[in-house]
Image: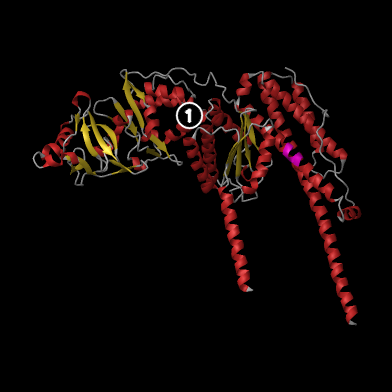
């Protein structure tokens, strides 16, 4: 008899655990209107963010899209009541965003437990200012990502101010707000704004101040003279919201007094940086390039190579850090290594074995098997280099992006290109590269040819 | 006492407790469902009061842009005073109270809808953050009223069905509980005012 009871108890416990796991796995996106089908990259980022919202704040943020010709308020409340039994939140903190492209409406339904944090006015504000600009451009996944970010920011404030209510059962009594979505209705005035000029005597800090003023005035003109040409092209396609601009000012303000101007040797590129980088992770570097004799803000390159964590700590996209114009700003990070996520960390090289080195790398020998019979007679010609080691913080990695097990196969470009470079030829090339010149090295990395370019120290 | 008598007494006691249990459970069920109706009614009143309290601010903002006549504000104030008398948070007795509440709700809705319609003629007003904030709060209150009304009607349906079934029907009659009124949408407002430019 006791064995029977024990077996029964075990079965019940197992069933309970399985049921809980099933509840946790239930999808939080119901995309009946197929708005997110073609944006897998952004949706992946959104899903990660959504899981973090649940993990950090116990907020279950659900999404539903529909094309029913029904009042969105009614639909949202009914949908909420259906979903609350499978809520992933343990304390009744539930949100449901509904987008209806048919009725051109969007609504965020808020549970009782979150009413004091996400008031109707606040929800209306983030819908209008945060989501609708993206919906106008039919960037549905971006709209979702943006509003999740705003929800998270508010949750962080609420936790700091202890605004969250005690745990309760999941329920909604109609709190939230709806807004006209204006899907595919471009705002012809969205990118208007008077021009802001950068003059020859402006230093990068002056240009940044002009930029901050334009942010404050919500000037979304993409063709401002203070931007590089690439940046103007970038902003013509990028959606900028009032909230984005407010946030940038908010994040910049504490960093302004600590910024230092780091100029490159050719006086064509500058970085406004708060040093040391690893102790000021919330102060993003700002990039500037000289065009037409004046300093211009290079936000296009910043957008390409910089990323921000959920705590607004900046780091590099390791794959894109040195792409295009990025390599011209690498000098500002000499002395810093990068972890696998792109976060910089300071390396004191003064007392290390690498002090006195120019590039900071070592070569090991390799040869092409087809040259095996020639090695003995002409080793200098056929022995080649593979990168066996590099020093964090030194130019080989920081400026050129060389990595261990890169097999060097060519150097130079155009008429100066040399294929099948030997060990000696490669070392000579690196040694002879004039300071400030652009160095080209082609390597075999994981079976693929990769070109590395960087400014010689 | 013989064995048979003891047996009869035992079953008699069991039967008594069974019947008592059923009666108590039934009575408690009636009371609980009645309280759910009262709670839902209170939610309707609370949110109507919330909407009433927001109205004067909305009028002031609209007036600032549209330069209304003073009488509009007076009419809204009168609507508020009249409505506040009925929003006493007392339990609804019957059809009369429900109808009054329904009329007030309609009047409120009509008033705010007219104000929002007028605002559409003033782009500056529509772009004003103060106006948009108030608009969202009022629409929020209206939505809460709608949800509370639906829940009220659900609670009434549940209660009415319960007291029509046996043995609750008998208990309800004994305790003086009768069927409750549903909250119906009103066709005409009890009192509405026209907003003139």
Q: Give residue A207's position: percent from left, percent from top.
A: 37, 24
Residue found 66% across the figure and 37% down from its top: A76
Residue at the image point whose x is 60% and y is 63% from the top? A11
Q: Quadrant of the N terminus of chain A?
A: bottom right
Observer-nearest of A421 and A402: A421
Membership of A98 in magenta stretch: no
Occupied quadrant, residue B63: top right
Determine whether, in the image, residue B138 is placed left or right of residue A25: right
Residue at the image point whose x is 63% and y is 38% from the top: A109
| Of residues A187 and A39, the one drawn nearer to the viewer in this rendering | A39
Residue that numbered label 1 is attached to: A245
Name the residue furthest left: A377
Q: Looking at the picture, how far across and down is residue A70, in whole percent?
A: 69, 32
Tell me where residue B107 appears, x and y as whole percent.
Answer: 79, 29
If the image is split into quadrants, where does the C terminus of chain A sit? Answer: top left
Tag 1 subunit: A
Q: Residue at x 63, y 69 (%)?
A: A5
């Amino acid at each position: 008899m006791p064995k029977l009871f024990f077996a029964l108890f075990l079965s019940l416990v197992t069933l309970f655990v399985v049921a809980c796991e099933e509840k946790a796995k239930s999808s939080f996106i119901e995309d009946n209107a197929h708005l997110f089908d073609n944006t897998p990259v952004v949706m992946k980022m959104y899903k990660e963010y959504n899981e973090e919202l649940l993990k950090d704040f116990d907020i279950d943020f659900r999404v539903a899209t529909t094309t029913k010709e029904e009042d969105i308020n009614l639909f949202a409340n009914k949908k909420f009541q259906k979903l609350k039994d499978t809520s992933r939140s343990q304390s009744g903190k539930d949100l449901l965003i509904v987008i209806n492209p048919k009725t051109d409406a969007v609504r965020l339904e808020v549970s009782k437990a979150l009413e004091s944090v996400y008031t109707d006015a606040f929800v209306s504000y983030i819908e209008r200012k945060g989501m609708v600009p993206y919906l106008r451009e039919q960037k549905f996944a971006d709209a979702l990502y943006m509003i999740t970010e705003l929800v998270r920011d508010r949750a962080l404030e609420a936790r700091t101010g202890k605004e969250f209510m005690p745990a309760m059962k999941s329920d909604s009594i109609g709190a939230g707000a709806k807004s006209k979505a204006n899907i595919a209705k471009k705002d012809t005035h969205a990118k208007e704004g008077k021009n802001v000029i950068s003059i020859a005597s402006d230093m990068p800090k002056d240009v940044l101040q002009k930029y901050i003023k334009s942010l404050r005035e919500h000037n979304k003109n993409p063709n401002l003279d203070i931007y590089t040409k690439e940046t103007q092209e970038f902003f013509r396609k990028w959606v900028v919201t009032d909230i984005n601009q407010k946030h940038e000012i908010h994040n910049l303000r504490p960093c302004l007094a600590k910024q230092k101007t780091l100029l490159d040797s050719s006086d064509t590129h500058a970085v406004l940086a708060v040093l040391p980088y690893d102790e000021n992770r919330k102060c993003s570097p700002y990039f500037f390039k000289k065009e037409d004799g004046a300093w211009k803000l290079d936000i296009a390159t910043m957008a390409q190579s910089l990323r921000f964590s959920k705590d607004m700590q900046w780091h590099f996209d390791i794959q894109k850090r040195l792409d295009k114009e990025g390599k011209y700003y690498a000098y500002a990070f000499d002395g810093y290594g990068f972890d696998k996520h792109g976060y910089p960390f300071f390396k004191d090289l003064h007392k290390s074995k690498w002090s006195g080195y120019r590039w900071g790398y070592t070569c090991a020998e390799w040869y092409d098997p087809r040259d095996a019979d020639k090695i003995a007679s002409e080793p200098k010609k056929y022995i080649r280099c593979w990168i066996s080691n590099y020093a964090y913080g030194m130019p080989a990695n920081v400026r050129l992006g060389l990595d261990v097990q890169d097999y060097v196969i060519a150097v130079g470009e155009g008429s100066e290109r040399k294929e099948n470079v030997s060990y000696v030829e490669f070392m000579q090339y690196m040694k002879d590269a004039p300071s400030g010149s652009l160095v080209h090295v082609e390597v075999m990395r994981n079976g693929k040819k990769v070109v590395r370019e960087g400014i010689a120290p | 006492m013989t064995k048979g008598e003891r047996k009869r007494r035992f079953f008699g006691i069991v039967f008594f407790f069974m019947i008592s249990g059923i009666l108590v459970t039934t009575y408690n069920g009636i009371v609980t469902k009645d309280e759910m109706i009262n709670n839902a009614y209170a939610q309707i009143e609370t949110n109507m009061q919330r909407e009433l309290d927001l109205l004067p601010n909305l009028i002031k903002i609209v007036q600032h842009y549209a330069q209304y006549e003073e009488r509009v504000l007076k009419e809204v104030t009168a609507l508020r005073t009249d409505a506040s008398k009925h929003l006493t948070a007392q339990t609804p007795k019957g059809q009369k109270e429900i109808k009054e509440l329904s009329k007030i709700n309609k009047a409120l809705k009509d008033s705010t809808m007219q104000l929002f319609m007028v605002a559409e003629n003033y782009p500056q007003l529509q772009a004003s953050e103060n106006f948009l904030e108030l608009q969202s709060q009022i629409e929020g209150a209206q939505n809460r009223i709608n949800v509370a009304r639906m829940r009220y009607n659900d609670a009434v349906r549940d209660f009415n069905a319960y007291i029509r079934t046996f043995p609750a029907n008998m208990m309800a009659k004994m305790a003086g509980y009768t069927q409750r009124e549903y909250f119906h949408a009103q066709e005409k407002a009890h009192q509405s005012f026209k907003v003139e430019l």
